[in-house]
Every structure is written in C-alpha cells, then in structure tokens.
Image (tube, rainbow, N blue to C red):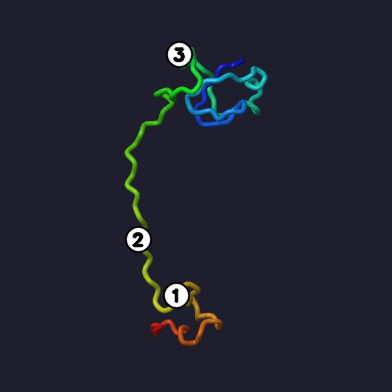
Amino acid sequence: MVDVVAIEPGYFGGARRDPGERFSVADALWKDEKRRPKWVRLARSGDKSTGKAEAEPADKKPSAKPAKPTTPPEPPEPLGNGVQEALGGPAPDWMPPEIQDSSQPVD
C-alpha cells in the first residue's frame, strides 16, 4: 500500500476525501498512471498520520481579500415597445397597430 495525501477534494475508496486527508492506495493502482487518482500526492514522513487533517500550509493558497461584489449597471429603458430596437427592423405583424410605431408611447 502507498500512503498518499489528497491535494484537492475527491472520491476514493467509497468516501469523499478532503484536501490534506491521508489515506492508502493499492500498489497496483498507484503504478498504473491512467487509473491512479490525479488529485493526490505521495505522503511524506512529516505528514500528519490521522485521517481527516487540515491541509498543510505549503498546500494552502494564500487567502486574498475578497473583492467587493459589484452590481452590473441597469440597461437603459428601450424606447417604444423594444421589439423594433431588439430586432433591428419593423415590428412584426402580430403586434397590435397601436404599439407598432415605436415613436409614439403607448397610453
């Protein structure tokens, strides 16, 4: 058996593995590069030997200050019914005649 540590969340051996979690993989599976999990690395002797452990500081990404969420600006209100502007041509014939002309507002 080969001891490995998860570097990303993954699923192996019937359980979800969290980053930093140490577990074992069969030798035959580890030797087959196509079948081995790509989200693990070999465990070093200094790695924590318990199951679910915190990721090591070297594996953690530096935490950046979260960006302030920005709301997109409101789109301008279309003139008329918006169909002619959206399609780039005259209003379709199924539109009532009183709103087909986009130059006059509808009451």
Identify the residue at the far top of this view. Answer: 45
Mark 2 or 3, nearer chain start:
3
Residue on which the image places disc 3? 46
Q: Residue at x 34, y 52 (%)?
A: 70
Residue on which the image places disc 1? 82
Q: Along the horizontal axis of the image, is 27 left or right of 23?
A: right
Q: Tell me the kind of residue under disc 1.
A: Gly
How would you rate the neighbour count of disc 1 (Cα within 10 Å): few for under 14, some for 14-19, many for 20 or more?
A: few
Q: Tell me the kind of residue under disc 2.
A: Pro
How would you rate the neighbour count of disc 2 (Cα within 10 Å): few for under 14, some for 14-19, many for 20 or more?
A: few
Marker disc for residue 73: 2
Percent across and percent down for residue 89 are 50, 78
On screen, 83 above or below 37? below
Residue contact at pointers 3 and 1, CB within 8 angstroms: no
Q: Residue at x 62, y 26 (%)?
A: 13
Label 3: which secondary element = loop
CA separation in Å, label 3 and label 1:
66 Å
On screen, 79 above or below 24? below
Which of the two residues, 17 or 28, is positioned nearer the viewer here?
A: 17
